[in-house]
Structures are given as C-alpha cells and as structure tokens.
Amino acid sequence: MIGNKKIKILYIIPSLNSGGAERFILDLIYNLNPEVFETSLLLFSGQGFFYSEAISRGLGVKVLKKRFKIDILNFYNIYRHIRKIKPDIVHTQLGGDIYGKIAAKLAGVKSIVSTEQNVLVNDNKIIKFFKKKTAEFSDKIIAISSAVKRDIIENYQISSEKINLIFNGISVEKFQQDRKNNFNKNQIVFGSIGRLTSQKNFSLLIEALSKIKNKNFKCLIAGEGELRDKLEKEIERYGLGNKVELLGLKKDIKGFLSDLDFFVLPSKWEGLGVVLLEAGLSRLPVLASATGGILDIIKDKKTGILFKNNNINDLARKLDYFLDFNNRKNLDTLGDNLFDYIINKFDIKKVASQYESVYLNLVK
C-alpha cells in the first residue's frame, strides 16, 4: 500500500497468445494480494488465446492493434494510456520491453520492472541494441532462470545487483494430478507441447522417431505455428503418419497430459520451459534437451533425463530407453521426483510472494 491507496501496476505485453510467458503473467496477477495491488493489462498487438479467460476473471484489459513493426501511433497510444491511468509501476515482458519501457519513462512512471522470458538467441542486432538500451530504464530486471540471468549480464552489461532471479511459477492446484493407472503395454503414448517453430525443434524429434525400430508408440504434438506444413511433410516422408500427430492448439492442457505416458521437450533453447512444470505436476517422466533454463528444472537422472542439445543420435537412443517397458519403474521414480521438486520450487503462490517483495521495495 502507498498510504491508504493500493499499488497500481500496469502490465504491458504484446498479446495473450498461447504461450508459457502469457500463461505465467496471468497466473501471477491472479495470485497477487488484491488488498495491496491493483492490476491491469495493456495488450498492444491484439487479444490472443487467453484473452477471454482474462476478461472472465475480471481483469482490466486495454487492447491496441499494432499495424507495423515500427508503429509510431501504437507507441503513442501506449504512452497515452500510461498517462491516463497513472500506474505506480509498469511491468513489461516479451515485446513490451522496448515500447513499454520507453513510453513509461517518458510518462514519468516512478518504477519500471521487466521480466526476461528467454535468452537472446533469436533476436536480431537491432532488437538486441534497443533491448540493451532500454534495460537501463528498468529499476529491476527479473530473470526467469539461471541461464537467462547469465545472458542478461553478458548482453546488457549491467550489474547483477539489478537482476533478481525468480523462476516462473505454475498453479499447482490447476495442473496437479495423479499418474494414470491404465498404462498400456501394447502402445506407449507420449507427447510434447509448443509452438511449431524452429526453437522447439520438432523436426529433430520426428527424425529421431524414424530411427526407432520395433516399438509400438504414438507421439502427440500440441501447438500451432509457421512450420506446420513442413512438419506434416516430414511426418509423411519418414512414414510416420500413423505414429506422429499434430493436434493444433489444446485448451485442456491438463487433459492432454493425462493421456500421456511420458513427455518430450526437444527445444534448441528455452528461457525456462513452463510446459515441463505442467508435465511434472502430472508426474510424467520427462526427456528434454540439455539447454538453457531447462537445466533449472530437469536434473539428469534425478528429475528427468537430458539428451545432448540438437543431437539426433542421443535423442533417438534415449527415446528408445523411454519406450522400453522394462524401464517403466525407473521412469516413474523420475516423474515422482520432478513432481516433488516443482511443488517445492515453482508454486505460483511462492513466486507471486517474491514479486510482491520486489514491488513493495520499489515503491518504498
């Protein structure tokens, strides 16, 4: 509180598209103390997958429409909205970092927070330049994993004291479920979740599966993206049409996970990997690439199994291990270990409490 007034926070992000970062920001808002904080969202590129949920939960949401990569009118509308509602804190993430922080600075906002959701692998030089420059406007930068924190220090060349490491959290009550008891010894069903983009590396998974012989399996991939046509052609080329299925976007992630025997994440890089938290709360054994923030969740042979990043032979070999019925007991133990680790480290209530401390220290 500031005196008798609630602390007003405006979150600025491009949209509420179907992604781990968007899911996280909503769950964070839901779990902040409503007696202390007054929250609202500014979406500057459009509504997105989770928009109707946000409205149904009573969140104040302002939606703009960005027309071009550099849209001066869009920037002005962000600035005007900030001036109108006069927030105590502006909190940006994803594409909101550049426009949002500049607009907040010009509007005279006293405290600016930004959350870095990924390592800067895929950003071009211009984006990196502006992210580095606008990082100076942040009073606090939140890194969602150890890898992201190292990346910020290296690329932004700022003091580690300005950076807080706070893992993205997950709603334990929403995703927690018992392992299914109807394990089918005739066919193993496993899957993955993610945008159909180069980062998620589903091409590697499909090619690795083409090397698996004499195993009856079904691989289900939930997500959409620009590589859908390419992936469908690869599935056909490797003769996996009856073994690998692209399901598109799934609203019921918990239900999707409940149908799986294990989970795979083949990403080339990840800021953290929220889908691993969702899979872990379903007690699923996990096979994931050894990269980025994944290493904060999957400890090899303790909370899951890692394969060498982008290494098709290592992935195929470890998929073969997961598809062996004789290894089921060992894999179930890994699933239980991951479940316990997530409950202890990644509960959204604990994470929200850490963010509250950041906000309160800034306004004081």
Image (cartoon, grey):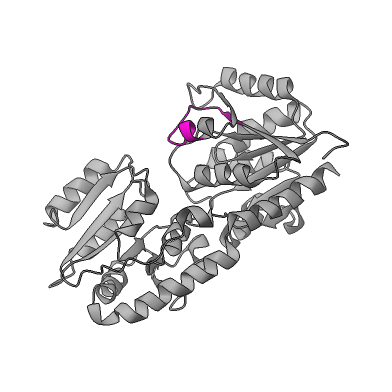
Which quarter of the rendering shows the N terminus? Answer: top right
Position of residue 263 relative to residue 26, above or below, is below
- The spot of residue 12 in percent (x, y) is 61, 34
Position of residue 66 relative to residue 59, above or below, is above
The magenta-colored residue range is 41-53
Residue appearing at x 13%, y 53% in the figure: 241
Q: Is residue 271 among the parts visible in the rendering?
A: no
Q: Is residue 63 among the parts visible in the rendering?
A: yes
Which residue is farthest top? 73
Residue 33 quadrant: top right
Residue 210 quadrant: bottom left
Left or right of 152? Residue 325 is left
Residue 50 in the magenta stretch? The answer is: yes
Q: Total marks drawn?
A: 0
Residue 60 quadrant: top right
Viewer-nearest residue: 6 or 345: 6
Left or right of 53? Residue 135 is right
Residue 95 in the magenta stretch? The answer is: no
Which quarter of the rendering shows the C terminus? Answer: top right
Residue appearing at x 26%, y 43% in the figure: 228
- The spot of residue 103 in percent (x, y) is 68, 28
Viewer-nearest residue: 69 or 101: 101
Residue appearing at x 81%, y 49% in the figure: 361
- The spot of residue 298 in percent (x, y) is 47, 69
